[in-house]
Amino acid sequence: MSVSIEIDGVSKTYDRPGAPPVKALTHTDLTLNEGEFFSLVGPSGCGKSTILNMVAGLLDSTSGSLRIAGSPVTGPNPSTGIVFQKATLLRWLTVYENVLLPAKVANAISTSTRDMADHLLQLTGLSDFKDRYPSELSGGMQQRAAIVRALVNNPTVLLMDEPFSALDEFTRETLNDELLRLWTERPKTVLFITHNITEAVYLSDRIGVMNTKPGRLKEIVEVKLARPRSPELRTDAAFYDIVRRVRGLIGPMHEETESRVGAA
């Protein structure tokens, strides 16, 4: 199996004028295989988003190296799609114009790109809303549009930073299923950040559990559950065994983090 993302000995320290530097991430090693769905979970401040932003080329590491498909990450990569916590749709553009924006910026709009956009909008139930503006959409529909935008150029890597955290539980679970359907149809390597353990287990092939102060990868949990996944899986005993295992790994760290905050 080919390697897609390589994180080798990566650390990140933030300098602060007039204050001691903050070490957000220390000596982290991680390899993601091509086509793998990998989630990172852990308490706030453990460096999950820091890792994603470095893989995206939006943030430089202090030490170590990052590679995508064997090439060093030196900046934003056109083969990488990104979905953030907020949809970040441009309010003056229609859904369709927002979806095609990455291709337009890359001067790469073509018939095949438009066909891809139309297909993805159909899959996500947005075809009838393509001429609407973001203010006319619900939060879930905006996130659907953001996912389509990230996929329209058919990237090999998809980075998702808590994309469903602001949504209600029903909408979140619906979008989990839609995301898996899109991923199954067009497999790509996914690095997914979430605080929701059941979401991580439902979506992932493996889950990286992170520690904090400073951030580091504590353990990787394999999710040996059959695909395709369906909503009924959430009531399965094997599913909840993995949820409990991941929660047990995070629990002591979360309590330690809370005690530090209280002491401060």
Image (cartoon, grey):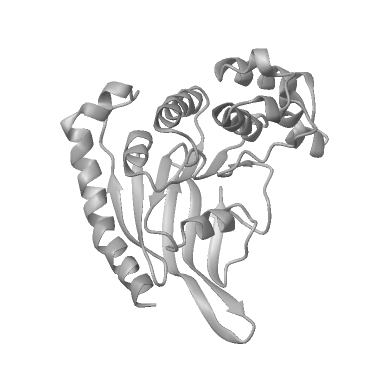
Asked if residue 60 can be seen in this view, the reply is yes
In which quadrant is the C terminus drawn? bottom left
Q: Is residue 21 left or right of residue 145?
A: left
Query: Residue placed at 33% from the left, 34% from the top?
Result: 202
Q: Residue furthest top?
A: 128
Q: Quadrant of the N terminus?
A: top left
Please report the residue visible at 64 percent of the width from the left and 56 percent of the height from the top: 57
**Up-down relation of residue 156 to residue 76 (above or below):** above
Residue 111 position in % (x across, y down): 77, 18
Q: Is residue 225 left or right of residue 41?
A: left
Q: Is residue 106 visible?
A: no
**Number of residue marks:** 0
Residue found farthest to the bottom: 18
Residue sitting nearer the eye, 90 or 119: 90
Residue 55, horizontal then vertical, whole percent: 56, 54
| Residue 16 pos. (x, y %) | 61, 79
Q: Is residue 204 above or below residue 137?
A: below
- Give residue 109's position: percent from left, percent from top: 80, 27
Is the residue 32 above or below the residue 63 in the image?
above
Residue 83 figure quarter: top right
In the image, what residue occupies the spot 40% across and 29% down?
173
| Residue lying at 47% horizontally and 28% vertically, measured from the top left | 175
Instruction: Give residue 144's quadrant in the image.
Output: top right
